[in-house]
């Protein structure tokens, strides 16, 4: 088995998908405009996929009320401070100080303009080796 994707039911998938492409380096790998706007977004190395969609059969979660520790999308960074500044200028909110773990990882949380928690992770040792 291989994880295919993680899905988020959101209020405005069109705007959110575009923001993720523009500011987080995601790529649209599939767009299904009807009956419910759906985007499958891949990371820059095409290893991870998230689905952003709006399906009225289920309520859009109140992402702002969820602790970032309960749900977040994590993105690796090599420029923590620069990426925080860039994302905040693009409409994100920085919601926690940068924390350095005992293993040397640097972590922080932001919220995108739709209040979904985003973690920036600057790892002392990558979780996965880069694909060739």
Image (tube, rainbow, N blue to C red):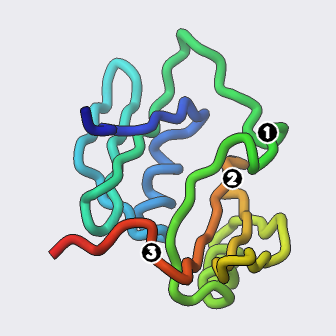
As rendered, which of 87 and 1 lies closer to the eye?
A: 1
Secondary structure beneath disc 2? Answer: strand
Q: Residue furthest front?
A: 102
Q: Mark 1 near mark 2, Cβ–Cβ under 8 Å? A: yes
According to the picture, the residue beneath numbered tag 2 turns out to be: 117
Q: Is residue 27 left or right of residue 7?
A: left
Which comes sooner in the sequence, label 2 or label 3? 2
x%, y% of residue 11?
A: 60, 33
Secondary structure beneath disc 1? Answer: loop
As rendered, which of 75 and 104 lies closer to the eye?
A: 104
Q: Mark 2 near mark 3, Cβ–Cβ under 8 Å? A: no
Q: Circle 1: is it few (<14), some (14-19), or many (20+) Cα within 10 Å?
A: some
Label drawn at residue 66? 1
Q: Circle 3: is it few (<14), some (14-19), or many (20+) Cα within 10 Å?
A: few
Secondary structure beneath disc 3? Answer: loop
Disc 1 from disc 2: Cα separation = 8 Å
According to the picture, the residue beneath numbered tag 3 turns out to be: 126
x%, y% of residue 4?
A: 30, 38
Position of residue 86 relative to residue 33, above or below, is: below
Q: Quadrant of residue 131?
A: bottom left
Disc 3 from disc 1: Cα separation = 27 Å
Disc 2 from disc 3: Cα separation = 21 Å
């Amino acid at each position: 088995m291989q994880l295919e994707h993680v899905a988020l039911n959101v209020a405005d998938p069109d705007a959110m998908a575009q923001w993720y492409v523009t500011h987080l380096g995601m790529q649209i790998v599939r767009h299904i405009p009807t009956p419910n706007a759906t985007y499958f977004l891949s990371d820059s190395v095409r290893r991870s996929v998230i689905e952003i969609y709006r399906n009225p059969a289920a309520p859009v979660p109140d992402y702002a009320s969820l602790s970032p520790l309960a749900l977040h999308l994590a993105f690796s960074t090599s420029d923590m401070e620069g990426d925080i500044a860039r994302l905040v200028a693009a409409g994100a909110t920085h919601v926690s100080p940068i924390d350095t773990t005992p293993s040397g990882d640097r972590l922080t949380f932001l919220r995108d303009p739709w209040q979904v928690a985003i973690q920036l992770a600057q790892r002392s040792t990558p979780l996965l080796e880069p694909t060739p």
